[in-house]
Amino acid sequence: MITVEQRTEFRKHFRYNVGRRLVLDKIVKCMVFVCVLVAIVPLIAILVNVFSNGASALSWEFLTQVPGAVGSDDPGGIGPAIQGTLVLIGLSSLIGVPVGVMGGIFLSEYGNNRYGRTVRFFNDVLAEFPTIVIGVFTFVLIVLTFGDFSVWAGSFALSIIMLPIIMRTTEESLKLVPVTYREAGYALGIRRWKVVFTIVLSSARSGLITGILLSVARIAGETAPLVFTILGSSQFIQDFSGPVDALPLRIWRLSSLPYDSAVAQGWGGAFILIIIVLSINIGVRYLFLHKKGQTLIKFKKLGSIS
Amino acid sequence: MTRLIDPHLSNLSEMMKQMCDLSVRCTNLAIDAYLGGQNARKEVHTLSSQMMDLYDKVGELTFDMILRYQPVASDFRLIRSSLEISYGFTRLGRYAYDITLVRDTFGDLSDCKNEVIYTLSGEIKQMVRLAVECFATLDLEKAKELRTDEDLVDKYYNKHLPMLITLNNVKCALADALVLRYMERMADHAAFVGDSVSYIVTGARTYH
Amino acid sequence: MMETMTKVPLKDNSTEDIKYKLIAENISASYDGIVTVKNVSMKFRDRAVTALIGPSGCGKTTFLRCLNRMHELTKNATLTGKVLLDGEDLYSNKVDPIINRRKIGMVFQKPNPFPTMSIYDNVACGLKLNGVKDKKIIDEVVEGCLKMASLWNEVKGDLKKPGMSLSGGQQQRLCIARALAIQPEVLLMDEPASALDPIATQKIEEMIQELKKEYTIIIVTHNMQQATRVSDYTGFMYLGDLVEFGETKQIFENPRNEITAKYVQGQFG
């Protein structure tokens, strides 16, 4: 037992120079704030830069028309590129999301063994793969086999890129769902796969959506794999088995041209690309995650739990 | 590690010890005084009231423990029995006082023969001492002995009480009747102590 | 101390035929190589509440999970023995464990209503995912179960509220309603009130007394006063063994085993 005298003795050893600590506290707070600014400044700078440079090229024709002849008076628009990007993202997601989510479910629910570890390892390797290599691989596999650049090839390459991201985030989100919910499901006599697909998956919804959106944003901006797989074109899509245009490709090509109007169009394209990615993000989040005041409840519960 | 209830249990044990002590002294004093022809009413009264005080305190303590600690198993049985036994001791004190009152009320009883009382008195004193030891050591053998002793006392009482009708001296007859009665009750309560001790040890209740 | 311990046989006082709903015979279980339940046999009487008490780590939760075949879902779990429900062995190869879990419902220690579902959906979940499609029947069952769990009056105004918006005690009652929805015959409860405040605990205990008129209830608790309030029979487990089993009054007033007496009086170190 610590006596009263001992307590007074021990208290003498504490530092009572509170003033210094308050100052230190403020300094650290400032440093942290500054770091945050340093992190945000490039983002804002890019957005401002892109907007200011690209705003001049924005117009309805810009968004909907085909590109005109290079260097001519009527530079046209990037309509096919926008269409191409949207189609490519959509098709890749159709391939990549189900496969990735199922893979993530496998790893999280059934993958605590050597087999699962191997799959996880290869998944991590694939996630770090240089995308240009993936592009070349797709070139050999699809373009050369079928004889033409196509939307299929582009989607295939992009889905390979988005697959490991989705698998990894799905696995992590599912693992975050407490075991107790699975057990409650089993105790109700529900079969394992039903428990996973109804209870666990819906609980991990927000993590899953975040992962998918992350990967969509990633592939929307990938240029290297598109070079070898879609070739690029100046027409709207007529046939999925032919070449198609996409925004990153178009931006790259426009920016390399020596004409000012082309460069301005490149900036405009970049701006459009950012807008597309942002709106997909915000739109999907709003649709899926703000149902019936769910997030408010979640924050309330987080507060009460912690 | 001491449980929260332990200090209270030792407090209870202290009080019970005091009551045991008092009941032995009470009994011996009352019976010896009666047989020796002295009036010990005041002393026995003091001892008896002390026992009543202790009984109240024991009651307070036991119900306090039940309220606060919800005792179970042997703790519970000990507490329940302590309450019953302390009541028994107060009855012993009461009857001891009643015996001294006989001397006090009836005055001089030197011409009474007292043989019956004399024989029984030894047995009663022995039974009270046995009851106290039984509770102190929680000895089942002693509890059994108390029951058999009580049987004997009952038989003796039933045999000798009617015989008092034949006595010529009314005063002696009445005095003997009263004292016999009180002693028989004291034997009963001593035996009840044995029953309570048996409950503490085995958990079996004796119903009368 | 262990060697002097004797296994106390079940005492059948009455001469009438006592109906045992659930009988566990020679259950031994382990996980990760550690044996947690050593050859435990118990009989659970129909329409009665049986409590399992014992210090932490004595195997009572593992034993409970053996009764509805939840133990085999634990990693590296092994189990031997038989569990007879109305005479039928739950562990025989012919029986599907999923079907058994519908006959024996379970309520867990920490309330765990499904977070993404409303109150109605939580209770109906077991029904819907087990193939019940008739909305009228589901409505009836949901209302009945919420009434049995003494929650109906508090939530009937808005059944579509998220399950997580209820208080802790209400959430636990919701979980009980959810377990009752699949029409089990036996209800297993693993320390159902340990995470709750006294008033919520009291409501759960009162509810158990009501439920025992229709169900056989087995409750694991580390609160001995709860066991005395709520149960008819009590089993005391220590280090994986069943040390003593009997009527609650007898266990707490006059335990026959020395270790039981020490434990119920709080004399464990």
Image (cartoon, rainbow, N blue to C red):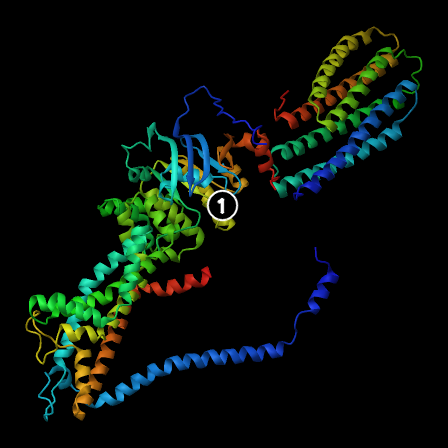
Q: Please tell me whether residue A113 is drawn above or below residue C213 in the rendered image.
A: below
Among the 4 quarters of the image, the one containing residue A85: bottom left
- Helix, strand or loop at label 1? It is helix
Farthest-out residue, top: B166
- Locate residue B67 relative to residue C106 in the image: left or right: right
Residue B192 in view here: yes
Q: Nearer the viewer, residue A113 or C175?
A: A113
Q: Give the x, y percent position of residue A83.
A: 14, 76
Three-letter code for the amino acid on which mark 1 is drawn: Gln
Q: Please tell me whether residue C180 is drawn above or below residue B117 in the rendered image.
A: below
Q: Quadrant of the N terminus of chain A?
A: bottom right
- Locate residue B201 relative to residue A127 in the image: left or right: right
Total numbered labels placed on residues in the image: 1
Q: Which residue is mark 1?
A: C202
Q: Please tell me whether residue B94 is drawn above or below residue C228 in the rendered image.
A: above
Among the 4 quarters of the image, the one containing residue A258: bottom left
Q: Nearer the viewer, residue C191 or A33?
A: A33
Q: Give the x, y percent position of residue B131.
A: 75, 23
Instruction: Check the residue under mark 1 and report the chain it is in.
Output: C
Residue B102 in view here: no
